Amino acid sequence: MTTKYLIKNVEVSGVVSDIAIENETITAIGKSLKSDGATEFDFTGSLALPGLVDLHTHLREPGKEDAETVLSGSQAAARGGFTAISAMANTSPVADTAGVVEQVYRLGQSAGLVDVFPIGAVTQGIQGEHLAEIGAMADSAARVRVFSDDGNCVFDPLVMRRALEYIKKFDGVIAQHAQEPRLTQASQMNEGFVSSQLGLKGWPAIAEESIIARDVLLADHVQARLHICHVTTRGGVEIIRWAKSRGINVTAEVTPHHLLLTDELARSYDPIYKVNPPLRTESDVMALREALAEGIIDIVATDHAPHAAETKECEWQEASFGMLGLETALPIINMTMVQTGLLTWSQVADRMSSAPARIGRYENHGSDLAVGARAHITVMNPTQLWRVDRDRLASRSRNTPFHGMEIPGVVQATFFNGRLTHKAGA
């Protein structure tokens, strides 16, 4: 059965155009295209971007389905404009075998709303001691190319070296959660003036920066690909800048919440602001924005981390780390990077679609909108405001730090493989 859509009056690369879709493919881009039996949508005032790609998503399934499932996470992703997401390995059981990554992969195919690319664990049980079944996961139906113990750091330098050496044979990448565990035992928030006033144990910037420094040197030594997850500090940015100036094959990501929120919010003692790595200072936030604009930080990744209510609605010290991110990511980037003049929309397309697809080796994602390209399309009205309501999000969890905030940018529609997977108001 042929599926046809005609997207009318959207901005494509700075020009107001129509986009014709037939089955999985963009068949025409131009002005005043004829419908030819297609279902029409008029999105005047909106712009079209390549479908967004998230390299850092926690879907919780298997094992923690009360917080999220592959289906509910896929629904949240589609509503956020994503056409591909990357399922982190810290599930229960951990995604450290071919069997588990294939289960997640097939759940994503069954949901059918986005491509779900499983990320494999680097070590067994994400315990940092013995390498996981990296080769088997790479050869599995899921064809895993990104490996991470996210939530935990691969803290042993010898284990990290062996992992970097191993993934070279199939052009994989290690995505490191940079957190020296001995420096962050029982840490609750950023170490600094606010933590000392609140009496909460601080999480020093050096705990992140020391691992980044070690691992870029290891990656250089073995000539392997390294990706740094959720960079949060000015010092971390400078280490990555130095590494890139040396030609070291390192990429890095920043989350939307670390581009906007600061450790001052911890004064509320509201665990909604408890996240790993922690919210940092205004100085760090500005450094991260500048680094993303400059390309020192390559991509935006959501670190979508859903948690059941009982693990967040409790005392700060007892609460889980993490925030939702999929449905609010693009508006927050609009607010922090586009409206401030730091990024153009074509640069947003690079940071949120083409670059993450390239790092993850995700074929058929991240292409420019062009005739003959796969029809992964995000349509967004950048000037329309909406008020975030945690009770109306698609996620099974409610732990968004943006509840009640009015933010700019409504995802009007998402097309995945030429199919409409989300339409605002539908």
Image (cartoon, grey):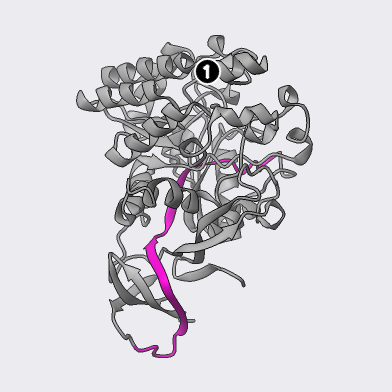
Would you say residue 207 is visible in this rendering?
A: yes
Q: Which residues are magenta?
A: 34-62
Magenta-span inclusion, residue 45: yes
Percent x, y of residue 246: 20, 23
**Is residue 139 toward the left or the right of residue 198 in the image?**
left
Decide: is 24 above or below 386.
Answer: below
- Residue projecting furthest to the left: 246
Total of numbered circles in the picture? Answer: 1
Crowd band around label 1 with a 10 angstrom C-alpha radius: few (<14), some (14–19), many (20+): some
Q: Residue at x 45, y 14 (%)?
A: 206
Would you say residue 362 is visible in this rendering?
A: no
Decide: is 177 above or below 57.
Answer: above
Percent x, y of residue 359: 35, 41
- Residue bearing mark 1: 130
Decide: is 37 above or below 73.
Answer: below
Q: Nearer the viewer, residue 2 or 402?
A: 402
Overall secondary structure of the magenta section: strand
- Residue projecting furthest to the top: 182
Q: Nearer the viewer, residue 87 or 200?
A: 200
Q: Nearer the viewer, residue 191 or 210?
A: 191
Secondary element at tag 1: loop
Q: Residue at x 27, y 17 (%)?
A: 221
Percent x, y of residue 408: 50, 57
The amino acid type of the residue labelled 1 equals: His
Choose top left, top right, bottom left or bottom right for residue 61: top right
Q: Residue at x 57, y 24 (%)?
A: 126
Is the C terminus in the top left, top right, bottom left or bottom right quadrant? Answer: bottom right
Q: Nearer the viewer, residue 142 or 329?
A: 329
Choose top left, top right, bottom left or bottom right for residue 391: bottom right
